[in-house]
Image: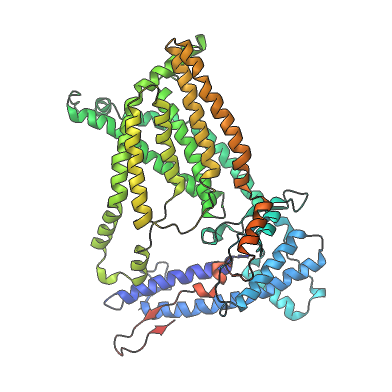
Amino acid sequence: MEMSCLDKLVEEREKVLNNLERADACAHHPKVSIGGRCSCCWGEKVDAIEHYRTELSRLNTSICHERELVPLAANHVRHLRKCDGNSNALDVISMSMSAISEGIQQLQTHDGQEFTHSMPLIECNESHFSFSDDDEERDIGEHINQIEINESKISPSSTAFVTFTSLRAKQAAAQCALTPDRTSMRVFHAPDPRSVLWENISFPLSMQDTAKFGMKVVWIVGILFWAIPVSVVNSLANLNSILQALNIKTVDSSKPWYGFLSGLLPVIALALLLDALYALIVLTAKRVLKLKSLSDVDAYATYWYQLYQFANLWLIVIGGSIFNQFQSFLNDPQSIVTTIANAMIGSSVFFVNMTLTQSIGKCALDISQLQKFVIALLMRLWRSESTITQRQMDRAKIPETYQWGYEIPQILFILMIVVLYCPIVPIMEVFGLIYFAGRYITYKHQFLHVNAQTFEGGGNATWLSIFVFIISIIYMAEAVFIAYMGLKQSPASAAFAFVPLVVTFVFHLDLRYKTITYLQNLPLQRAAAIDVKEGECSDFNRLIYLQPSLNTCLDEQFHVVDSNTRGPDAVF
């Protein structure tokens, strides 16, 4: 459901609770200004704790009132469904809202048992949902309720979660076409409830498709112009040129530290540039595309971040050759292969530095958690320990979740470097071995003792996307090997190099039709066998997909002890 007023009230209450806990943690009674333009000045000074308690009581009352309007909204949708019996999408949403209204009443007594089968996510066109006020068909009481619902902006959204008691029923619903019009209703496998982005759940799918197309154009144009920042990064390898541009005296390039910095600075600059790019992709997925789950965000970030990693390699290799010798390539197109082969050999030093930096630097940072320690130390110096609230200490104990959309493209980038350079620079295999051995040790330690996944993506960000990239890497490596053998004027070796290419193509087709297809949708025969073996769900938690703003079990409570009376905790 779309409940903008209720969501804002819950968000405001969260801020008031944080302010109240910070005020209570202070040794003295802090003051806060009210009635002014700013919370620190131009207003009447009042006691902060008493003010936040009053605000918390007001917000709790408003939130309870907003929640009471949800069953009224559900009844209104059922009335519209009776008037429009052909709207299948409205039927789904009406049943969903009815389940929500019944679930709210059962919330305090539910046993909390979770079901085992996932549910499809049904997307409906927003045009199916519209409230109409017909005073002639309603009495005065219903009309007043409808005015309150409209003021609270409670309306059905374009998304519904449907629960099934058997896996085969769920798979049948996910694999069939429910309506002849694709724009009216689409079915997806439901994400993990912990990964749902509830603030985006009401965004219509039609608008999301339009935004995806627009951002696809933006990312493709960005790849075409990605050579500009990559060229700037490569220019950092020439320190004397930078010093001359800044009117600073140049240094002796024969010194050991000069070569070390010349090789390290471009690698660090490229890593920072890619980190900024990943943050921009994730921000776009959440704020512009408004994807509805973190697993979808991971899959989207993995896809585009990996494409930019591919572009990085070829732009670094050919950026200084093709663009500078474009006219000669037009006169002699066959020279492109020779130029690329020579450029790959010249760029091998940069990729060796990158592999070693990732092997040593990133593994050391992940194991030591140095960046988090520095941040915590600076926060401790800025704020005294007595002002830290229990909520802040609890948040600091939450394990970090690995962002697969960030980690996996970096691993595949090193794999692409090692595989491509195997026939040209064989020592690259040694550096690749060091990298993957270090990452194995790091991931094993982090997953067992440090990190914890807050949600499961079902492989959406890994198998379905990474398989295509891995096969592409193998194809590119075999094509480079064939071209390199041809440049060595070894026809027999070049002809023999076609054998692994054909084998890879046959293996790709076999794996695609026998495995990848069934990874996307579980066959009904296999689903029925699982139902027979494990049994159907006789009871499940109907509130597992309940919006957080409607779930009273998630309501924050503030506990404060009166230091004067030492009495029991006061709960607000």
Q: Nearer the viewer, residue 328 or 486?
A: 486
Q: Position of residue 508 (x, y in %)?
A: 57, 33
Percent position (x, y) of residue 334? 50, 11
- The image shows residue 101, relative to residue 395, as above or below, that is below
Please name the residue shown 21% across and 29% down the image. 258
- Residue name at image x 77 percent, y 70 percent: 79
Asked whether, in this view, residue 300 is left or right of residue 102, the answer is: left
**Closer to the camera in the image, 446 or 80:** 446
Camera-nearest residue between 478 and 378: 478
The vertical placement of 352 against 276, above or below, is above
Q: Is residue 478 left or right of residue 505?
A: left
Q: Nearer the viewer, residue 206 or 185?
A: 185
Residue at 62% from the left image edge and 78% from the top image edge = 105
Using the image, determine if residue 341 lies above or below residue 141.
Answer: above
Q: Position of residue 488 (x, y in %)?
A: 42, 12
Figure quadrant of the N terminus: bottom right
